[in-house]
Image: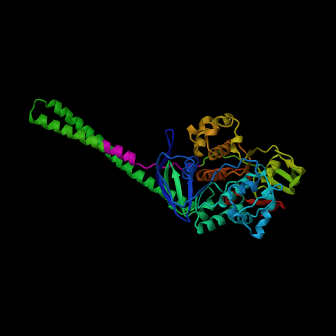
């Protein structure tokens, strides 16, 4: 269905993609992974026709029709129904009785949806009221879902999905997995950028991993990729050691030949007028110099062959003691919005050593709950008692808002840590000296999240409140953040739909929905 050969893309003098070659066949589910900024979205946009590549070829089968799901949320005043009915022809309108309820819903205007979209609405358990909702009133997860519904309801047979699970709740991620699997069995092909590790393991037939502009294709999903990269790194280390040993032997030989050639050069100069002896010394000196040059060229060639090895990060942060004390106690709290009760009668408490996760459907008020418990807003009902002597860091979904200064390194006060130690700790979190000097706007969400966690640790933070901390992060950043949080001695309260992240970091798990807050 799709063939890509030697694809190259550059921005100015920066190479983004270099000789990328792979294919997608009918019914394939291919995952696309790599660090933030590695070129994954660029590749999708080239295939979709939104960007022009520099070299190589993108060949689509004659009957292939692509559809592209961007990362960016919808920005429109339209209703959900209006988005879902865009570009649907009369031949696609369903006359099935149980679907007719989706007509005549927008202030008396008549809208219809096709049978496929109606089935998707049922699969995602979306109500009649949701269709009347304006996009600007939807949560980020609901906006993401509308984009996905519109895409899956189209008749494209090659779907390009850029981070489809971002902001989706666990129930809808599971539904999406089932739908993609079913659609692939029916012949639709998928090329998916995702950093949801469970999602990739369950769906991907193959994974194309982009690193330093080059593509590596392996069978399987996230776990298979990590195993391959680990084995590849070990093989690279072995090869690098072998080459280093070979280079050391050649350098010793060059030094020996250099001394020998120098001695013969002196013999040649001293035997300039001695006929046969002088000529023989000259030949030996020349031979020694040639041998030295050959070995030096061999050394240069071997140095060029030494494989690039990504330096593994090893967390090493200052240890500090966290006393187990009360942080907050919420009793029978409730929130109303635009005259509607979001939730009520919620009671919850936390101590500075607790690891608490909150999950639940999109739009149920999880972020609002975090803001209540942190003291950012007051509940409409009930009371929240907060211990303000605890050093708490709140990292929002928009992690860029955490930083007060435009230059990244300026957000770390000298009173907290000296600059040498700071650069060492940032380096341990995969943030180089060069990146530390950049503007906040030049860093990826994963790099900003890592920096925020480093700041929390060097500031002796006692408790972290994290709102969707894994959103928009690449797999490398997720692995680093997992390790950073494992090093963190304090407590955590977080909202997440990342199943692997929840399993690793939550000791207490709550589920929030319209019925209230329940302990799982």
Position of the C terminus, as image quadrant, is bottom right
In magenta segment, residue 393? no
User: Is residue 256 visible in this depiction of the protein?
Assistant: no
Image spot of residue 92 (x, y percent): 68, 63
Taking depth in this image into account, of 368 and 185 the one nearest to the observer is 185
Image spot of residue 218 (x, y percent): 50, 60
Q: Is residue 234 left or right of residue 396?
A: left
Taking depth in this image into account, of 170 and 126 the one nearest to the observer is 126
Residue at the left extreme, as displayed? 275
Residue 504 picture quarter: bottom right
Q: Is residue 57 left or right of residue 184?
A: left
Q: Residue at x 53, y 55 (%)?
A: 209
In magenta segment, residue 300? yes
Image spot of residue 339 (x, y percent): 89, 51
Residue 411 picture quarter: top right
Image spot of residue 148 (x, y percent): 68, 57
Residue at the front extreme, as displayed? 90
Q: How is the image coloured?
A: rainbow
Q: Is residue 316 left or right of residue 106?
A: left
Q: Is residue 412 above or below residue 515?
A: above
The stretch of residues the image draws in magenta is: 296-314
Q: Is residue 94 left or right of residue 257?
A: right
User: Is residue 277 visible in this depiction of the protein?
Assistant: yes
Residue 199 picture quarter: bottom right
Q: Residue at x 64, y 35 (%)?
A: 407
């Amino acid at each position: 269905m799709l063939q890509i050969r030697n694809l190259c893309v550059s921005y100015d003098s920066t190479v983004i993609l270099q000789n990328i070659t792979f294919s997608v066949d009918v019914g394939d589910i291919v995952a696309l992974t790599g660090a933030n900024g590695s070129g994954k979205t660029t590749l999708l946009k080239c295939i979709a026709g939104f960007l022009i590549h520099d070299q190589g070829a993108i060949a689509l089968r004659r009957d292939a029709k692509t559809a592209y799901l961007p990362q960016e949320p919808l920005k429109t005043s339209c209703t959900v129904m209006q988005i879902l009915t865009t570009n649907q022809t009369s031949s696609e309108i369903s006359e099935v009785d149980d679907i007719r309820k989706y007509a005549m819903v927008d202030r008396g205007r008549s809208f219809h949806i096709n049978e496929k979209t109606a089935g998707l609405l049922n699969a995602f358990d979306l109500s009649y009221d949701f269709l009347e909702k304006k996009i600007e009133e939807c949560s980020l997860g609901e906006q993401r879902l509308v984009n996905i519904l519109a895409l899956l309801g189209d008749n494209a047979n090659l779907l390009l999905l850029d981070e489809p699970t971002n902001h989706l709740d666990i129930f809808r991620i599971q539904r999406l997995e089932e739908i993609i699997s079913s659609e692939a069995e029916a012949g639709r092909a998928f090329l998916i950028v995702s950093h949801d590790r469970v999602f990739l393991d369950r769906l991907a037939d193959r994974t194309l991993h982009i690193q330093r502009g080059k593509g590596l294709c392996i069978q399987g999903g996230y776990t298979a990729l990590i195993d391959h990269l680990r084995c590849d790194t070990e093989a690279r280390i072995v090869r690098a050691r072998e080459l280093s040993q070979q280079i050391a032997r050649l350098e010793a030989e060059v030094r020996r030949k250099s001394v020998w050639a120098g001695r013969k050069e002196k013999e040649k100069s001293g035997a300039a007028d001695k006929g046969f002896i002088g000529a023989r010394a000259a030949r030996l000196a020349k031979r020694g110099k040639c041998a030295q040059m050959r070995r030096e060229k061999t050394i240069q060639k071997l140095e060029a062959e030494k494989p690039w090895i990504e330096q593994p990060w090893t967390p090493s942060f200052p240890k500090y003691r966290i006393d187990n004390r009360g942080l907050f106690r919420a009793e029978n709290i409730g929130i109303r919005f635009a005259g509607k009760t979001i939730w009520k009668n919620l009671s919850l408490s936390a101590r500075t050593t607790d690891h608490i996760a909150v999950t639940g459907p999109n739009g149920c008020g999880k972020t609002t709950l975090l803001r209540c418990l942190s003291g950012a807003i007051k509940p409409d009902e009930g009371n929240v008692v907060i211990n303000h002597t605890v050093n708490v860091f709140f990292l929002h979904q928009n992690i860029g808002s955490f930083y007060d200064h435009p230059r990244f390194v300026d957000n770390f006060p000298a009173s907290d840590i000296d600059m040498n130690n700071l650069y060492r700790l940032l380096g341990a979190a995969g943030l180089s000296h060069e990146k530390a000097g950049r503007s906040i706007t030049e860093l990826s969400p994963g790099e900003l999240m890592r920096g925020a966690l480093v700041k929390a640790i060097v500031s002796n933070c006692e408790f972290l409140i994290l709102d969707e901390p894994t959103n928009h992060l690449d797999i490398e950043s997720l692995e680093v953040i997992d390790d950073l949080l494992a090093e963190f001695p304090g407590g955590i309260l977080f909202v997440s739909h990342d199943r692997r992240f929840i399993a690793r970091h939550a000791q207490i798990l709550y589920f929030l929905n319209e019925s209230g807050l329940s302990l799982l």
